[in-house]
Image (cartoon, rainbow, N blue to C red):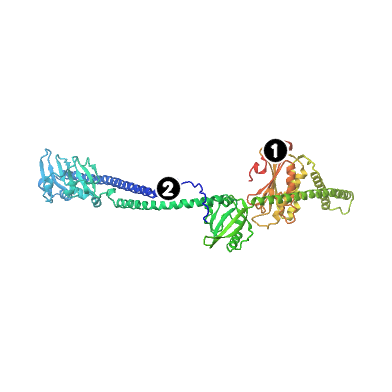
């Protein structure tokens, strides 16, 4: 019995652009061929331009050399004319003069001595020393140089332009160019090549003109031009070997494109079939809210569905083919995740699943529960593992929220009990402290009335006075605690913070000396008075200095890092707030923020109760102030407390108090 046919899903047809992709290689190849032909044409033009530039440069250089050579001959002829005027030799001895012989050995053809009436006085014929030049001279292919004589007349030297060129043109230039002297009509006067090549001019093989350049030799040669014709011929781009190779390539790519089109048609028919099946599978997978993951026996990710990709914040394509460690594993538990991975690959995964924590791409943690099952192929072979993943982050969050609420309620109960205990202790300690102060005052009065022999040691009297002061101070502290716990407002009065800081430092002198800590005070003499409870503010300063002293006492002494505490007072630029800073050179906050430090029952000391900074913060907030803590430059902790100068003004303008927070007033130096 055959199964009923599956209804076809609406599979969108491929666009016409994709259907014609088989022709893309042919189009790219034609574009490549066009680029190659364009490159060959541009290369040919570049070679022609380069040859032209080099030709002009060499022509200018040779022009200067030829002009210099002719000018030198003119100078030598002028010098000979001066010598001839001084010597006045006989005409028949002209040919024997060394200057004439040297000129004829260079490239002179003949020398004529004319008198003042331009009559020939003497003439050195061309056949003398130069029997090979009569035809050249007879044809008129010669140049002339004229030098006047001081006695009247002139010397006229005829020279051979061809010999002049052969002696002047360098050998390397003669190999590159055909060098010629021509007149304004283009007739060749002299050339470095034979007559046939000279008459051929600038025509090369197949009638293709060779590059040439003509430059005037005026005024050294009248109606004379120096012409250079390049010997090298640039092969036309359409007759080069690359063009033939490109033509063969076009034929080959056309044949390959035809075969590719046949193959693409077959693949397209098969693609339509499996695209329908893939659409069915994708529709079912996208409807799931459970993450699915398939891995091979080595742990390589073969497949993930959209639900899992959205769960970890990665695209499915980014996860395909990855091997452990995975990018969504937390960086602080890579080893534990690898142990679970090896256990799962060995087939020992819990059948009931297991919980773990992953990390979203944005950095937030994700709590998941995983179920692993064997993955088999169509032949029944075990090829990997299939995992189902459930996101239980929201469930965990709700459980954690319920737990925190329970802890908060228990914490509030402890705080209530602690307040009652503190209130009881303050009430019970008030009378003993009062009695101690009374007995101390009575002892002092008795000692002062008695005339003892020997007299009483002043140190004893001073100690008793300090005992009374401390007892009275303790009584005031207990009284303020009672008032604080009974929700009564602090006793506000005008007080000088510099005196409060000095008093706190005096009370802690013995403790500082015992811990070998040096305390320095930097008090602003222009600091305005503030409206505050001096006793409570003094308790805050004492607590901050004592905490710094305890932190310094726990670290060993070092010459390069002495134990130092600095207490500083200053006012804000608008004179509406004042600050008290306590800075130490201890180990610092070690990454802890003020919120954690002021949390009730949190303490960094082994025997601390964790209530000191919490009480300090409450006292400052009761004064509309603020407490802040940060790392000090160079190491150590920096605690800052801010108080308003006029408490009523701060209450009316709470935003000013926020702007006067330690971080907003100014940066630490």
- x and y percent of residue 323 in the render? 54, 58
- Res 157 label: none
User: In which image quadrant can residue 158 be found?
Assistant: top left
Residue 588 image point, x, y percent: 66, 52
SS of the residue under disc 2:
helix
Gap in angstroms between the C-alphas marked 2 and 1: 71 Å
Which numbered disc, 2 or 1, marks the residue that appears first in the sequence? Answer: 2
**Looking at the image, do the residues carrying marks 2 and 1 touch, with CB atoms under 8 Å apart?**
no
Q: Is residue 115 left or right of residue 521?
A: left
Residue designated by label 1? 654
Left or right: 67 in relation to 404:
left
Foreground: disc 2 or disc 1? 2
Residue 460: x and y in percent read 83, 53
Q: Nearer the viewer, residue 76 or 401?
A: 401
Which residue bears the numbered disc 2? 19
Give percent across and percent down for residue 392.
64, 52
User: For numbered disc 1, what is the local secondary structure?
Assistant: helix
Q: Is residue 90 visible?
A: no
- Residue 4 visible in the shown view: yes
Farthest front residue? 1
């Amino acid at each position: 019995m055959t199964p009923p046919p599956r209804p076809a899903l609406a599979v969108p047809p491929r666009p016409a652009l994709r259907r014609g992709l088989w022709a893309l290689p042919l189009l790219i190849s034609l574009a490549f061929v066009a680029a190659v032909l364009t490159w060959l044409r541009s290369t040919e033009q570049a070679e022609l331009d380069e040859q032209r530039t080099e030709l002009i440069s060499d022509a200018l250089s040779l022009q200067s050399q030829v002009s210099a050579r002719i000018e030198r001959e003119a100078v030598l002829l002028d010098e000979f004319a001066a010598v001839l005027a001084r010597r006045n030799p006989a005409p028949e001895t002209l040919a024997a003069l060394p200057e004439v012989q040297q000129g004829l050995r260079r490239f002179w053809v003949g020398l004529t001595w004319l008198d003042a009436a331009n009559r020939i006085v003497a003439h050195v014929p061309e056949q003398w020393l130069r029997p090979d030049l009569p035809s050249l001279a007879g044809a008129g292919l010669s140049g002339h140089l004229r030098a006047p004589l001081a006695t009247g007349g002139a010397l006229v030297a005829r020279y051979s332009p061809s010999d002049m060129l052969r002696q002047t043109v360098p050998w390397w230039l003669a190999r590159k160019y055909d060098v010629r002297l021509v007149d304004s009509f283009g007739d060749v006067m002299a050339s470095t090549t034979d007559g046939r090549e000279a008459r051929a001019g600038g025509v090369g093989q197949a009638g293709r003109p060779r590059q040439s350049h003509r430059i005037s030799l005026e005024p050294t040669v009248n109606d004379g031009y120096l012409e250079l014709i390049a010997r090298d011929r640039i092969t036309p781009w359409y007759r080069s070997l690359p063009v033939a190779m490109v033509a063969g390539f076009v034929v080959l790519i056309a044949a390959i494109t035809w075969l590719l089109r046949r193959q693409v048609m077959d693949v397209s028919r098969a693609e339509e079939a499996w695209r329908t099946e893939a659409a069915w599978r994708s529709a079912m997978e996208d409807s799931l809210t459970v993450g699915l993951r398939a891995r091979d026996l080595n742990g390589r990710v073969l497949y993930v569905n959209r639900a899992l990709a959205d769960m970890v914040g990665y695209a499915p394509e980014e996860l395909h083919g990855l091997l452990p460690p995975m990018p969504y594993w937390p960086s602080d538990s890579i080893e534990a995740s690898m142990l679970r991975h090896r256990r799962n690959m060995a087939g020992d995964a819990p059948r009931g699943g297991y919980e773990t924590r992953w990390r979203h791409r944005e950095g937030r943690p994700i709590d998941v529960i995983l179920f692993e099952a064997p993955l088999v192929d169509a032949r029944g072979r075990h090829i990997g593992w299939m995992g189902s993943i459930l996101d239980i982050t929201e469930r965990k969050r709700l459980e954690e929220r319920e737990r925190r609420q329970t802890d908060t309620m228990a914490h509030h109960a402890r705080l209530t009990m602690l307040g009652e205990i503190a209130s009881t202790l303050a009430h019970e300690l008030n009378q003993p402290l009062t009695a101690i102060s009374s007995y101390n005052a009575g002892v002092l009065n008795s000692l002062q009335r008695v005339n003892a022999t020997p007299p009483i040691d002043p140190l004893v009297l001073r100690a008793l006075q300090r005992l009374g002061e401390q007892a009275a101070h303790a009584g005031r502290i207990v009284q303020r605690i009672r008032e604080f716990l009974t929700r009564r407002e602090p006793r506000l009065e005008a007080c000088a913070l510099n005196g409060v800081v000095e008093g706190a430092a005096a009370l802690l002198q013995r403790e500082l000396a015992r811990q070998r800590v040096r305390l320095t005070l930097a008090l602003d003499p222009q600091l305005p008075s503030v409206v505050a409870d001096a006793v409570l503010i003094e308790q805050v300063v004492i607590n901050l200095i004592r905490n710094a002293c305890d932190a310094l006492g726990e670290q060993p002494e070092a010459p390069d890092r002495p134990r130092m505490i600095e207490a500083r007072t200053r006012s804000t630029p608008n004179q509406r707030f004042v600050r008290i800073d306590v800075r130490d050179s201890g180990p610092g906050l070690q990454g802890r923020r003020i919120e954690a430090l002021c949390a009730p029952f949190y303490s960094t000391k082994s025997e601390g109760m964790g209530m000191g900074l919490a009480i300090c913060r409450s006292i400052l907030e009761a004064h509309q102030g603020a407490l802040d803590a940060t790392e000090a430059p160079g190491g150590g902790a920096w605690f800052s407390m801010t108080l308003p100068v006029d408490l009523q003004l701060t209450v009316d303008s709470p935003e000013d108090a926020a702007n006067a927070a330690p971080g907003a007033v100014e940066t630490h130096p």
